Amino acid sequence: MQRRPIRSFVLRQGRTSSAQRRAHADLLPVYGVPFSPSALDLDRLFGRAAPKILEIGFGMGETTATIAQEHPENDYLGIEVHTPGVGSLLKRIADGHLENVRIVQHDAVEVVQHMIAPAALEGVHLFFPDPWPKKRHHKRRLIRPEFVALLASRMKPGALVHACTDWEDYAQQMLQVLSADRALENAASGYAERPEIRPETKFERRGLALGHSVWDLIFRKI
């Protein structure tokens, strides 16, 4: 019998606002990309040749929309499973007239495995992935050796993977896993300073005000 894969997420029945529902219904056919077991032609998807950045788990889309607006020279493919967040980012795309963002509402592991061609990406963002803080749930954490190796295979030489978390033990695990991958090298000495390209979110500012820390990690594809 085939074993079910361990998911890095659980679909929660969170509240979806009427604006998010409308955006999801009206705009997903415009800016969404259905899951497919074959690799995307990213230049064709965006209608141009430009650096392609993968945004994994964009939450409510605040950071993704801000980065895309500040960097129109790049194209951003965002992955998220939760409908409220997808609806929220779709609304931000429409409000900001952002033509450089597309969305896949599906499991990130399957998207990277099947829809992203080898050496297709200039960068990967993994901002505040679910920390699964209970020890028995650590196996659900997204940053694991097999997934990092898969990501690295989809990155061009010189491409950057940028991860961050506000959970110290997850930061330590991230550093250990990323450092162990032979296709990657640390672009900093240990943890990196927060780069300007990553804007602070409301959630992050609230945590910093409470004395929480955030750890950024930036690794380069060799």
Image (spheres, helix red, strand yellow):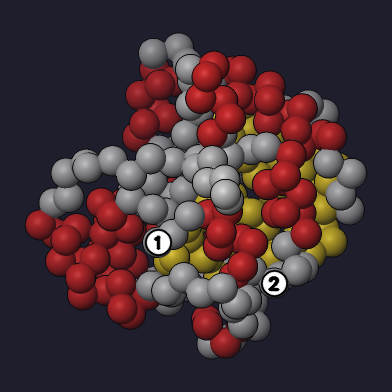
- Picture residue at 89% right of the left edge, 44% below the top: 182
Kind of element beneath mark 2: loop
Residue furthest top as drawn: 211
- Picture residue at 47% right of the left edge, 34% below the top: 130
Asked if residue 92 shows in the view, the reply is no
Instruction: Assess whether mark 1 and mark 2 are in contact (beta carbons under 8 angstroms).
Output: no
Asked if residue 28 shows in the view, the reply is yes
- Picture residue at 72% right of the left edge, 44% below the top: 146
Residue furthest left as drawn: 18
Q: Is residue 35 above or below residue 177?
A: below
The one of 169 and 141 positioned closer to us in this rendering? 141
CA gap between label 2 and label 1 equals 18 Å
Tag of residue 146:
none
Image location of residue 132, percent across then percent down: 48, 26
Q: Is residue 63 above or below residue 32?
A: above
The local crowd at label 2, few if under 14, some if 14 to 19, many if 20 or more residues have their Cα within 10 Å, is some
Q: Is residue 105 above or below residue 11?
A: below
Tag of residue 105:
1
The one of 33 and 68 positioned closer to us in this rendering? 33
Tag of residue 117:
2
Q: Horizontal placement of 74 versus 82: left or right?
A: right
Q: Callout 1, which amino acid?
A: Gln
Image location of residue 139, percent across then percent down: 58, 30
The one of 19 and 154 positioned closer to us in this rendering? 154
Q: Callout 2, which amino acid?
A: Ala
The local crowd at label 1, few if under 14, some if 14 to 19, many if 20 or more residues have their Cα within 10 Å, is many
- Picture residue at 51% right of the left edge, 25% below the top: 137
